[in-house]
Image: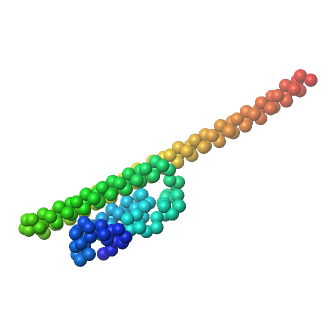
Amino acid sequence: SFVSSGLWVPIDNLLTLGLASKVPSLRISSKLRTVRKMSARITGLHGFLSRKPNRLVAGSTEVDDGADIDTDDMQKRMAAIEKIRGDVEGLGQASELRTSRRRRFGFGRQARAARDEERTKNEILEAERKLREEAMEEKLRKEEEAKDEARRMVRVKEIDRLISEGQVRLQQLICEKDVLQR
């Protein structure tokens, strides 16, 4: 089992009213690990909440695929981060509701906990699937743009060659005209 670091420890303790340090199964951070890792892979903000050195903040402008970060890309990444942050807050609120329900009613806790855990797993899987789809769409879009750029460059080279040939032919005609006018 994985132990989260940085701000995740206080987040877990806050959301579980201090029980996360004693009961590892209540740690939200371990349940959200796959979502956190997937979002870090997509956004490039590894260690954002654990306060680990970030390669984007440290000055590197390269993403995994080697492309430069532009403002649109950064805005998309920030939107993804905000969306995931909202999902995390929603899961925390759901955890608080589960805790308060258990205290009030006191019966059927295991069944409810199992349903809530299954629902959380399904939400995480759905979020991962959406992130993978978005990443794949972005990759396909970039590949298509690269193909279009390559086609344009080939056409530009062809046009340059035709212009060069035309200039050579024009120079030949000018020389022939000069010879004929003497």
Measuring from the top left, give residue 143's x and y in whole percent. 48, 50
Q: Quadrant of residue 12?
A: bottom left
Position of residue 135 relative to residue 162, above or below, is below
> In this view, which residue lies farthest toward the bottom?
22
Could you tell me which residue is drawn at 34 percent across and 71 percent down? 4
Instruction: Indicate left or right for 93 with 78 as reference.
Output: left
Q: Is residue 108 visible?
A: no
Q: Dividing the image into 4 quarters, which one contains the N terminus?
A: bottom left
Measuring from the top left, give residue 53's x and y in whole percent. 46, 67
Position of residue 169 relative to residue 131, above or below, is above
Instruction: Indicate left or right for 10 with 155 as reference.
Output: left
Instruction: Indicate left or right for 47 with 118 as reference.
Output: right
Q: Which one is nearer the viewer's eye here, 14 or 167?
A: 14
Q: Quadrant of residue 2?
A: bottom left
Could you tell me which residue is drawn at 25 percent across and 62 percent down? 92
Rendering colour mode: rainbow
Could you tell me which residue is drawn at 52 percent across and 48 percent down? 146
> How many numbered discs sit on the rendered protein?
0
Q: Which one is nearer the viewer's eye here, 72 or 6?
A: 6
Q: Which one is nearer the viewer's eye here, 23 or 154?
A: 23
Could you tell me which residue is drawn at 73 percent across and 37 percent down? 164
Q: Is residue 172 visible?
A: yes
Measuring from the top left, give residue 73's x and y in whole percent. 46, 50
Measuring from the top left, give residue 76's x and y in whole percent. 41, 50
Q: Dividing the image into 4 quarters, which one contains the C terminus?
A: top right
